[in-house]
């Protein structure tokens, strides 16, 4: 870290260190943006302003700016908190298939899932802080008042630890600490399963709310989390493909992985929702059947059938299974509809649990259903929360190296094949990283051959010799023995145009020695060069 001429250099990143330098850098960056990018940032800025104003209106105690009432105590802020919190878990669950279990097709999720998960959880904490008014009490309560039998206490513990683990995971993504990253990914995957389970248990233990009560509520919460996380990854990689962002060349294959996970998640969620509706319609528990009737044939029916079933399940599933619609654009559309469907589903879940009053203890309520209309303040806070997350992620895509990492560290699972490629199982990842860094420091071009045969020790495979243009030309000019044709000269991997690997080039095609340039290092993948 060095400070030179009002600029702070953090490794290869230059950060303006004075207000004047910051203003000049911002003006310069805006001037370099396209018109569409400026419009995008302008819209997000408007959303942030709306969120900031409505958040300030929600802070003073005693101001009745929420749409909640004594008979309808949990409103859209609880919905927003649940939505962003479970989306965090879904992102980690989907990415753990690559980062923890080493399934290669899911490895491109690694960096983007971590950034999105950290932003999503931060957004969820901001929403619940505005809902609670005094969030510091929750922090002290979780630390000083230990209640191991309370699902809400465990929810606070898991999500608090989750935030710390995600910070460590993001830090190790951009620094050479593969071993720490391996443990952080594993812990994040474990908490990613426990956190939405305890969040569902917060609702599931409330016997006074029959629509929420039961063992299937945490299961449905985990299923909704998985669908939301995969859908958000689908939207992110659609944007990568559409706007040619970092590692865009592999985005289409990555969207194929998203289609598989999203279709499976939607099918499981559909089965759980159908079970909940059938159970409610045939139940004799007071309040359970009326709440279910309100959902499927009452005031909540249009949102349920139109928003959740049709737009959130049937249309996305139809797009995902239709062979002709398996394109990046349609996959992004299916992901967007599925994500919106999860938000509608969580909204209906919260509202349906309170719409049928059990008593009139809290005051006069409407019959047969309680009334709730979100206020402009609640809507504005959610708009600001979504704008914050979109703005922060857009800046991360613009200024952070979001391509796939050069070294992946996994546990030595039995289904992983050990060979020389750097993105497979490496029980000692630091050695593989040191090999790449050492080769770069010595100025040697390390040959990369994805389908190389397995050696006796995959961690100590010898690197290829540096390519010498003079030796290549001499070998090409040497006469072939016994009148045989001149032998082809082997070129180093990655010496083609734009980083495309070239297996061999004939002697007549070899350029002059002074025109040759060294090929890209193994970290410079063809898709990143594009």
Image (tube, helix red, strand yellow):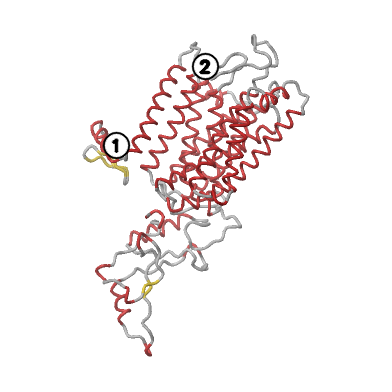
| Figure quadrant of the C terminus | bottom left
Determine which quarter of the picture holds residue 87.
Answer: top right
Q: Which mark is residue 62?
A: none
Relative to 489, 193 lies left or right: right
Q: Residue furthest left?
A: 5
- Binning the other alpha carbons within 10 Å of mark 2 as few (below 14), some (14 to 19) or many (20 upward) gives many
Q: Label 2 to label 1, Cα distance in Å?
A: 37 Å
Q: Which residue lies furthest to the front in this view?
A: 324
Q: Mark 1 points at which residue?
A: 30
Determine the residue positioned at 61% across, 23% down. Answer: 351
Determine which quarter of the picture holds residue 371.
Answer: top right
Question: Residue 514: where, in percent of width, then height?
Answer: 24, 69
Question: Residue 466: where, in percent of width, then height?
Answer: 35, 68
- Binning the other alpha carbons within 10 Å of mark 1 as few (below 14), some (14 to 19) or many (20 upward) gives some
Q: Is mark 1 on a helix, strand or loop?
A: helix
Q: Name the residue under label 2.
A: 66
The residue closer to the viewer here, 15 or 3, is 15
Q: Residue furthest top?
A: 364
The residue closer to the viewer here, 94 or 412, is 94
Determine the residue positioned at 31% across, 83% down. Answer: 478
Q: In this view, does 373 lie above or below 5?
A: above
Determine which quarter of the picture holds residue 284.
Answer: top right
| Figure quadrant of the N terminus | top left
Question: Residue 461: where, in percent of width, then height?
Answer: 46, 66
Question: Residue 109: where, in percent of width, then height?
Answer: 50, 47
Q: What element carries label 2?
A: loop
């Amino acid at each position: 870290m060095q400070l030179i001429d009002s600029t702070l250099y953090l490794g290869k990143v230059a950060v303006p260190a004075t207000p004047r330098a910051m203003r000049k850098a911002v003006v310069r960056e805006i001037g370099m943006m396209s018109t569409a990018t400026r419009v995008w940032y302008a819209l997000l800025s408007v959303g942030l302003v709306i969120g900031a104003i409505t958040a300030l209106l929600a802070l003073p105690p005693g101001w009745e700016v929420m749409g909640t009432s004594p008979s309808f105590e949990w409103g859209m802020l609880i919905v927003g908190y649940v939505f962003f919190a479970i989306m965090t878990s879904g992102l980690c669950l989907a990415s753990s298939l690559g980062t923890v279990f080493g399934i290669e097709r899911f490895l491109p999720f690694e960096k983007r899932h971590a950034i999105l998960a950290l932003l999503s959880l931060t957004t969820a904490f901001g929403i619940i802080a505005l809902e609670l008014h005094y969030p510091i009490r929750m922090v002290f309560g979780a630390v000083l008042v230990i209640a191991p039998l309370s699902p809400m206490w465990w929810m606070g513990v898991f999500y608090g630890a989750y935030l710390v683990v995600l910070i460590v995971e993001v830090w190790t993504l951009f620094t050479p600490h593969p071993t720490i990253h391996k443990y952080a990914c594993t812990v994040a995957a474990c908490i990613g399963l426990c956190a939405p389970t305890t969040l569902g248990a917060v609702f599931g233990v409330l016997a006074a709310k029959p629509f929420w009560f039961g063992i299937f509520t945490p299961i449905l919460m985990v299923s909704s989390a998985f669908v939301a996380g995969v859908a958000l990854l689908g939207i992110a990689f659609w944007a990568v493909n559409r706007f040619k962002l970092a590692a865009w060349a592999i985005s289409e294959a990555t969207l194929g992985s998203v289609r598989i996970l999203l279709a499976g998640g939607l099918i499981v969620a559909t089965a759980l929702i159908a079970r909940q509706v059938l159970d409610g319609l045939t139940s004799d528990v007071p309040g359970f059947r009326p709440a279910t009737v309100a959902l499927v044939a009452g005031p909540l029916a249009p949102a349920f059938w139109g928003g959740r079933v049709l737009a959130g399940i049937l249309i996305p599933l139809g797009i995902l299974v239709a062979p002709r619609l398996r394109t990046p654009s349609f996959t992004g559309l299916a992901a967007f509809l599925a994500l919106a469907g999860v938000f509608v589903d969580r909204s209906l879940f919260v509202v349906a649990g309170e719409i049928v009053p059990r008593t009139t203890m809290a005051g006069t309520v409407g019959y047969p259903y309680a009334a709730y209309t979100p206020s402009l303040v609640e809507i504005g806070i959610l708009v600001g929360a979504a704008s914050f997350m979109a703005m922060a992620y857009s800046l991360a895509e613009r200024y952070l190296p979001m391509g796939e990492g050069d070294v992946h560290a996994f546990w030595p699972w039995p289904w992983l094949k050990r060979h020389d490629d750097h993105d497979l199982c490496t029980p000692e990842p630091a050695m593989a990283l040191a090999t790449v860094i050492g080769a770069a420091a010595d100025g040697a071009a390390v040959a990369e051959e994805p389908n190389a045969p397995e050696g006796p020790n995959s961690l100590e495979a010898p690197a290829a010799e540096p390519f010498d243009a003079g030796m290549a030309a001499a070998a090409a000019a040497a006469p072939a023995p016994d009148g045989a044709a001149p032998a082809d000269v082997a070129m180093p991997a990655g010496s083609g145009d734009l980083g495309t690997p070239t297996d061999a080039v004939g002697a007549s095609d070899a350029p002059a020695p002074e025109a040759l340039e060294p090929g890209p290092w193994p970290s410079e993948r063809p898709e990143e060069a594009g």
